[in-house]
Image: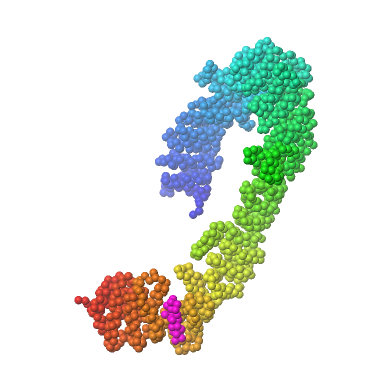
Amino acid sequence: MGSIDWNNNTVITQLFNIFQGTVVNKGQKTVKPEDKKSPANTRMRLKIFPNLLKSRVAAEHFPGCIQVIFGCLFGHSLNQKIKLLAMQFVHHLTLYASDSKFNPIASVMLSGMVTVVGASAVDSRLRILAYGAVGKIAKRLPELMTKDMALLQTFFDAFSQETADTKLALLECLGMMSESFKDLKGPNVTLMEALIMQNIEKEEPQARMMAVQYANVVFPGNHIPSRYVLLLACGDVKEDIHAEAVKHLRSLPKEEDSSRLGAVEERTLMPAFPELVKYLMEKGNQRVKTKNKYVIGNNTLPFNPGTYGEMLMYMRMCLAYNAGVTPDLESIVTMQQQAPVITKYVQTLLKDSSGEEGPIQMYIKMIRQLVTAIGGAPVMYCLLEVVAIAPDKLASKFAQQLDWLKGFMFSAKEEMRMSAGQLFAIAVTSVVKKSKLNKIIEDLTQMLKDKNLEKQHGALLTLGYIIGRKFFLSRQTLGDLTVEDMETDAMEPADRAIVEATKRIGTCLDNSQQLIVTGTCVALGEIGRCGGVPLQDGNPRADQASAGVTKYSIVQKLLKKLNSTQEHNKIREKAAICLGHLCVGEAHFPHRRMVIEGLLDCAQPKQFDLHFTVGDALVCAAMGPCSPAARHVWTTTEEDFRARVKDHADDVSWLLDLLLQKYVTSNNPHIRQASCIWLVSVVKGCSSHTDVQGKLHEIQSAFMGLLSESDELTQDIASKGLGLVYDNCSKEQKDKLVASLVDTLMTGKRSKHEVTSETKVFEEGSLGTTPDGKNLSTYKELCSIATDLNQPDLIYKFMHLANHNALWNSRKGAAFGFSTIAAQAGEQLAPYLPKIVPRLYRYQFDPNPKIQQAMTSIWHAVVSDNKKTVDTYLKQIVQDLIKTLTSNQWRVRESSCLAVNDLLRGRQLDDVIEELPILWEICLKVRDDIKESVRIAADLACKTLSRVSVKVCDVNNGAVGERAIRGVMPCLLKNGLGSQVEEVRGISLDTIVKISRNAGALLKPHIPLIVTALLESLSGLEPQMLNYLSLRIGSNQAAQDKLDTARIAASKMSPMMETVNQCVQYVDASILPELIPRLTELIRSGVGLGTKAGCANFIMSITRQCPQDVTQYAGKLLSALLNGLSDKSTSIRRSYGMAIGHVVKIAKDSSVDKLIRKLKVWYMEKEDATARLACGVTLRAINETSPDVLKRHTALALPLVFLAMHEKKKEGSSEGDNNTTVWEEVWLDATPGTEGGIRLYLKELVDIMQTALESQSWHMKAQGAAAMSTVASKLGETLGPPHLGQVLKALLVGLGGRTWPGKEALLKSVAKVCVSCKSAITDPLNQTEDQPSIDQITNAIMKECRKENLAYKIEAVRAMGEILDCYEIDRFQEFSDILYPVLKKETKNTDDDDDRGSEFTRLNSKFKATAFDSLGLAWPAVKETQEEHRAEMWLLLSNSISTSTWKEQVAVLKSMNKFLDKLVMLQDGALLQTQSANVTTMVDQVIPPLCDCLGNIKYSTIRTEALEVTYKLIHKLTGASQLSLIQAEHQLKLGQVLDNMSNDNIPELKDKAKELRKLLPSQR
């Protein structure tokens, strides 16, 4: 039964009819009561429902589906399972019903679900499903929800009533409903605000989570009340609610979701800062009067700290957003970078509202409130930022609160101390008088001696910020910042307090505490950046101890810190920044070059962050006052500063020369790495500088050289540098840069470096270590290991490997460069695209993930439309891959394979059809690569090629398909199926099979090649285990045949044979001239069971497909198949025989005649049983498939069949297993019966039997004799001259000579002929010279009776007895002379188990039994002879009964029967009276042994034969009235025995015993 289509409308309609019964809808005709059908019962409904859930059509079946749902949910007598299935059906409807069907009933379904939810007694599982259904309905039809806000309120309230499992379903339901409320208007907006505000502070966390979700989803980003709800959630105790709220607040909404509450202005993704501050302030004032306030110490907060902190940060985001900046709260540093942009907006807000109720003032008030209560560095920064932006308007507020600020200056948190120190400095320098300022400086200076580290650090920072700001404000009084102003030296002299403080700060560089040292660096850097350090210049030649703290000593100490590897990286970075800043505030800093050289000397390995910091410091030091660091960091952007500052004498040119000539070309890779980072910093920081512009070519060359470094960071930085150069160079320079990059990418050329003993050739650890644990990385170390190993040539191998790595490093570096400039260099790259696209495509699949990533980035930069570009350059890519697939580098081979795998998928390949065979050939070769990863990649490529080839070789592709199959198929057959690699053969075979299914008639030209290759592969692709198994069981022919049959059956079901069978339909006269020679050659030379059987099956198929076309090739096919009949496998011989049977149907009669004669010769001459069986199988196949052909050649074939029928069967074989069964089938099918067939072909039969008897083969002689026996037995008396004479003459001739195995058959045949043809032999008319007489026959057999071979002698004696009995010839004297000596030998009675004796004993016993039997047969009816031999014969028989085995006893008793039958004395009453004494003697001799035999319980045969002898003896004596000749005692004994036999379990014996007992006198 096939599967049911549950989407069949008829089927579903019937299901609904069964489910509902008869339902009369409105507008339909009334149904008579007797025609109404009852609804299905509950059990039936439970069976139907699962099938409705499988059907999408069921969701469209209206109104049936809604009737079923409501009937099952709200009907009567319903169990829980039905309700659950009905609820599942609701979900099914919401998913699959069309809008036209679903929308009209959605409100009805929704009300039903709400009813289920509202029922308190409903099972929780049903409620869970109902909530899910409501959510899906809301998602499907959102407008349904906005009409009923009360439902939403109900669901929110349900959180306090539902169980845990149901709450989860309710949560999901509300989540799906949230999208429905996006476009609320009017009063619904207020209701929603109230709802989420109410739920955000509920006890149930699920309600709070939903409030967060609705606040985010329903309202736009500029909706303040919803943002307030999210801000409240930021302080939630549940981490997931807190995280969700923060995520929504920190991520900006999309532009399209900006506002849904009316018209919006340009920037409305976030609330307006003034409105937000005002709203939050109002809410805070309200909450502080309620129980929701938060008390910490003496401070009362309107919100908990988490909420309050997030509120302030969100206000900072809105402030930045409103100022035109994308908010970034990642760190304080990033926030400070945005401060100059915010300045203008803050100034505007202050100008518009200068009172205490202004947004900035309220913002400050809220910050101070939170900072006072709990602190917090980010919040303190927000306060610092807004005050620093407008110190003239806001700093005065803090001048009276310096003590409050000092509390934070000495905070435990470093960031807090820094922000508080800056705010303190702004407050005191903006408002405080000079005298008080000096006092503050002195106090802070004294604090530097405090033992508390935090106080020391806070004092250091604050001093630095105060002195720096003091200097900066002094410089601002000169007007706009220009270099000329800086050089006028108009700045007023520093006060003594400042000088002393600076010196004291300088001495802190010697402090052992990291915190103090870093604080000192920050303070000195700030002083130097803002106006120069107020100290003596110092002199290198002067005594530093006596000179005290000078600029030189500070520089020297900072450089020492910088270059010391013992110092913490944080100290070194702060020292570098400080050194750079020292050169900024002073136009002619005396130690500028010393600073630059010191910074350049700090190159050390793996100090990437330090190098970037040093790079920035070098820009500051080289540019001096023109550096962007000299600007007002809170109010001036770098762009504005560069636009205002004028050129000034600096050291940029000198720095560039140092970098390009000394550091970039260094032999030390760490120095080169550091110089790359520094050079990028210089180019970036001084991009518009004239010296940089003038040296762009040298800088570009330096970056190009650095691209070839082995270090990825260096390559990446160099690529960024190239991008900077490209941005600042001319069009001609851009063209040269692109050309150079392309050349490096294609060839891997790299800049040359001088190799010294310390040159690092490999990365550490890549070659392992020396025995003593040292690294192998430098040239010197490699030379040393090569010398130690006494292999100088090893160094060349190392260098070759290093060069190989360098080649790829160059390409990877070029990739970094490309990825940076490709997006901008469209015009310059265009001419190179045909060259670089193929290479780039392959590089994307490099095994090294880093190179792969680099190349992929270039690809995305160069290629805008991936598919279009690949399609455009498809041919070039394929040709490049063909070259690289066989590269001597494994990584190239692997990447090429992966590229092939990716390239061919889903593309139109018409332009590369000719390349497919080459790709196949190479990929199949690489599939056997020495490296496993390459093999895996090649396997992927081959599988993709397979899919592509199958698709393109489809018959529907027309000419393209023909071209494809013409190239692909021969390649697969030759290189795939012919491969020694199992995986290659497997993928090739699979592809060929799939192509054959789709190619249709396109296969026709390739059929000869396909068929022969696939037939040959039948054996090659067979599991080797089967060959091993066949070898193991080779001695067991039956098992071997079963295995072979199974193997052939499996090969017929294989994909190869399936494909061959598909090809058969396209075979015709145009194919055969090429196909037949290949096929016949394969039959002759093919090896393997599958191949041979496949060939036979294919021949049978084509003879059925195109018999007329194959006719002319029948002879060749028969010749080839005939050779295969000698195969050792029975199954193969059978297959070839069947094939011959099909071919002869279309072959010429002469070919068939020749075939049968060949089979006859084989049978008669070959001793091999398998060959003979093959002949039989062939004739049987001919008879089965082409009986009419066999009928035309019966006279030639059937005599052979008849002879073969008589082949001797093997001992122990069953009838079905024997070869003769095959021949018998043919004979019975081809003849009207055995006797009729013999009569029809008697002459031919006699001829072949004569030939067999004349054969040199003993087996053939015996077989011929057996056949003659059959002829004689079937024809009997009708067999006469001349055939009888021929037969007898041949048999007698065969009897002559020595005895040979199987000669017994001749004796049997002679006896059979003589017995069956008695009248013909004795007929005087037939007595001719050509027919032997009976005397000649008996003489010949008598002669054979004298032979010594016991087994043969047995058959001769038996034959002699039968002939003498049949012809009643008296030759007893001669016969007994032969047998008596043997029979009279005394032998022990071995009882009944003669099988336990030796072979000779067994044969001897058998001979005696045969002799006794034959003596009885040969007993003559001649009175004289009887008189002469009666006594001796009877005595021998009587005595032998007791001394013989049971088989011999049976023979003796049978002989006695014959003896008594022919005994003349008992037949003549008169003679009996005269011979009464002799009879009495005979009776006395036989009665005792007879009684013993009658009493033999074990063998019923003995009892039967003994009873027969007794019966004849008593009847003959009774008939002659001479029963008294049996003595009384013998009668008594005989009567007892017969009485016992009257109870025998064999009815016949029982009855006969009773009958005999009646003849004997009764006992008294």
Asked if one can make out residue 520 in the rendered structure from this viewpoint, the answer is no
Quarter of the image where one finds residue 1322: bottom left
Quarter of the picture containing the C terminus is bottom left
Q: Camera-side residue: 1378 or 1023?
A: 1378
Residue 733 position within the rendered picture, expressed as x and y whole percent measured from the top left? 78, 36
Residues in magenta, as a range: 1335-1357
Residue in the picture at 54% in, 39% down? 103
Residue 94 position within the rendered picture, expressed as x and y whole percent measured from the top left? 52, 40
Q: Residue furthest left?
A: 1564
Residue 345 position within the rendered picture, expressed as x and y whole percent measured from the top left? 67, 22
Q: Camera-side residue: 1022 or 1534?
A: 1534
Asked if one can make out residue 1129 in the rendered structure from this viewpoint, the answer is yes
Q: How many marks?
A: 0
Residue in the picture at 51% in, 19% down? 290
- Dominant secondary structure, magenta: helix
Q: Camera-side residue: 352 or 1341?
A: 1341
Residue 1526 relative to residue 1300: left or right: left
Quarter of the image where one finds residue 1068: bottom right
